[in-house]
Amino acid sequence: MPAEESTPAIVLRARDYSESDRIVTLLTREFGKLSGIAKGAKASRRRFERKLEPFSHVNLFFRRRPQGQLVFITRAEPGDSRPPAIEDDLAKIALGSYMLELADALTSEEAEAVDAYHILVRALDTLGGGAASLAIRQSFELNLLRAAGFGLAFGHCRICAGGEGTVGGAVYFVVSRGGIVCTRCRPQAPEGAVRLSAASAAALATLAAAPIEESGNLAPSGSEGALAIARFLASILDRKLRSVEFLDSLL
């Protein structure tokens, strides 16, 4: 029998399977994203009661199966952090659900994702301790994109590397270049772009560099910055996130 392994993990999504089992997808600290089956999860209070629901932060115990991608979840114990206190706040529920779905979309099964795990933990803790805001959303998006290998550049031009473009007039976020180009270099980047004011670009650069815990005290970029991030995400994701429309209606 395979040895039992364990890791801290956050439950991203879960669904019932058969009369008593659950299929659960988690972002783990040690093994990246894992999907597993919890036998008897709907009936076993001692091993699983309310520990395999979305947002739960647990110490996961599992065994690998000889065949198939699903691991066999043996038990789950409370983790170091409690689930965020969001139950009575619709905006927090919407933003938290989006965080889980985006983390799911930007990670792969069993690929290294320790940075993404820590970013999600910190973002949910920040959300639970304050109000849902566009600044927290943008900070989470930019930090998670960097962890996934997509470091977007808003502080300097992707072509000339100059930073003066963010001081004066408008700059242009070019999706295919993953960053801004200044007005002077814009003719060299004829691709479609989102026009950003200097203030919006500077706000995104600040949010990308600051710890998520500080994002609630920072200014967001506003609608044009949100559009730039949304277009980049659409260019790299293979599906539309279900939580986006509802979240956009609230933030």
Image (cartoon, rainbow, N blue to C red):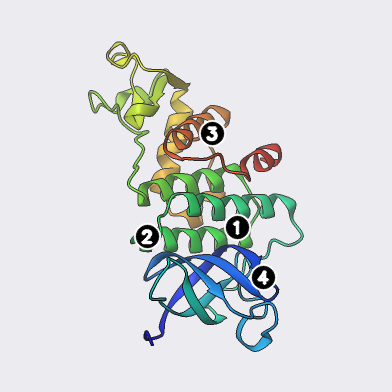
- Give me the C-alpha separation between circle 1 and circle 2: 18 Å
Q: Which kind of residue does numbered mark 1 sit on?
A: Leu
| Position in image of residue 242 (x %, y %) | 62, 44
State which quadrant residue 38 falls in. bottom right
Q: Which residue is mark 3?
A: 226
Q: Which kind of residue does numbered mark 3 sit on?
A: Ala
Decide: few, some or many residues near mark 1? Use Cα within 10 Å; few <14, some 14-19, many ≥20. Answer: many
Is the C-beta separation of discs 1 and 3 under 8 Å? no
Count the labels in the image: 4
Residue visible at 51% across and 78% down?
A: 73
Decide: few, some or many residues near mark 2? Use Cα within 10 Å; few <14, some 14-19, many ≥20. Answer: some
Decide: few, some or many residues near mark 3? Use Cα within 10 Å; few <14, some 14-19, many ≥20. Answer: some
Q: Single out the mark in the foreground, 1 or 2.
A: 2
- Give me the C-alpha separation between circle 4 and circle 2: 34 Å
Q: Which residue is mark 1?
A: 127
Mark closer to the chain start, 2 or 3: 2
Q: Single out the mark in the foreground, 3 or 4.
A: 4
| Position in image of residue 120 (x %, y %) | 49, 59
Q: Nearer the viewer, residue 126 or 56?
A: 56
Is the residue 123 above or below the residue 199 in the image? below
